[in-house]
Amino acid sequence: MSKYFMFAFILYIVLSSRSICNAQELLPFRQDSLWGFRDEAGEIKIVPQYKYITKFSGKYAIVSDGRLLGAIDKANNLIIPIQHEYLASLGTDDFLFGDKSKYLGEYIMGVFHKDNSVIIPKAYSYISKINGLYTVTKNLDSVISKNSMGDLRSVKMLYGLIANDGKTIIPCKYFYLQWVNDKILILTQDDKWQHQALFNRKGKQLTGFEYKVIGEFKEGVAKARIGNKYGFIYPNGKLAIPVKFQYCEDFIGGYAIIREGNNWGAIDKRGNIVVKVNRGYKFVVEHLKNKYGRIQVIEEPKVDI
């Protein structure tokens, strides 16, 4: 082994060891009634001084004086002053912050940067970050009655979407928001789940709200229901196969099984009938396997038509 290679190998081991040591996780520990942090070897890194702490999420941990919350970095620098009733790290330099609402355990939330610049004002019941954007909700309260224990309420949640810079992408007025993937989502217009529409992450509406069901996108299309009929749509919202079947399954291997009454059949990606709808479920599955190599477990679904 050459001297150069040996030196390079030793240098690699030294640098790797330093990297591992530097990357050691700081673990919360309690001493008497106060909390601090130590490394995995047990060495104290932050002397116990807080009434409450969380584990580090990214670069920061939430700490409390027993009443209010702030945030520290791994050198115990107070990044966010201990002055908030609600505070949670988003794993970046941004934080959820908020105040208690009139109801126990509920808060009015917003988002700010570690420099205290507000990204989203305190106006929402809950905020989460999914696919790089903020999903926001507001509680729509209706007080049914009041008593000595408090208000009896009916609570409905409204959903919206906000960009990283705080600009509204989708107003907070929909009864449900569901991400299909990192590019498209489904919004529900009413609380009975009868009217759904497809949107993209920029807030562009891709379909009308005529859909009762929009399924998962599989093999480039999603099962969609209008009234009591099924068809398929593309991710851009355009119709792939007309909504005309009494029931249909997702595509597998380029073919989807359909049903009319008590009879089953199958279609291809163009909507062409490849197995006439006059057969039993098991026959259709086996025919698609034998003729097209399509593999599926033979288990007839329970369908309420």
Image (spheres, helix red, strand yellow):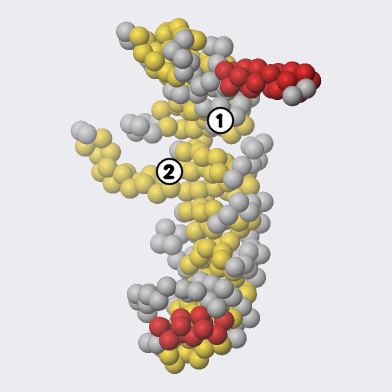
Of label 1 and label 2, which has the lower sequence position?
1
Q: Pointer 2: residues within 10 angstroms few (<14), some, or many (20+)?
A: some
Is the residue 275 above or below the residue 98 in the image?
below
Camera-side residue of 148 and 263: 263
Q: Residue 163 at x, y = what percent?
A: 64, 41
Q: Residue at x 48, y 43 (%)?
A: 137
Q: Which residue is mark 1?
A: 91
Q: Which residue is mark 2?
A: 139
Residue 30 position by quadrant: top left
Determine whether the residue tagged by mark 2 lies in a helix, strand or loop: strand
Q: Quadrant of the N terminus?
A: top right
Q: Residue at x 52, y 42 (%)?
A: 136
Distance, label 1 to label 2, CA atoms, is 26 Å
Q: Which of the two discs, 1 and 2, sits closer to the camera?
A: 1
Q: Mark yes or no: residue 195 visible.
A: yes
Q: Residue 103 at x, y = what percent?
A: 34, 33
Camera-side residue of 254 and 190: 254
The amino acid sitting under disc 2 is Asn
Determine whether the residue tagged by mark 1 lies in a helix, strand or loop: loop
Q: Pointer 1: residues within 10 angstroms few (<14), some, or many (20+)?
A: few
Q: Are marks 1 and 2 in contact (CB under 8 Å)?
A: no
Is the residue 216 above or below the residue 37 in the image?
below
Q: Quadrant of the C terminus?
A: bottom left
Q: What is the residue that sits farthest to the left in this orientation?
A: 148
Is the residue 217 above or below the residue 272 in the image?
above
Q: Residue 151 at x, y = what percent?
A: 28, 38
Q: Residue 219 at x, y = what percent?
A: 59, 68
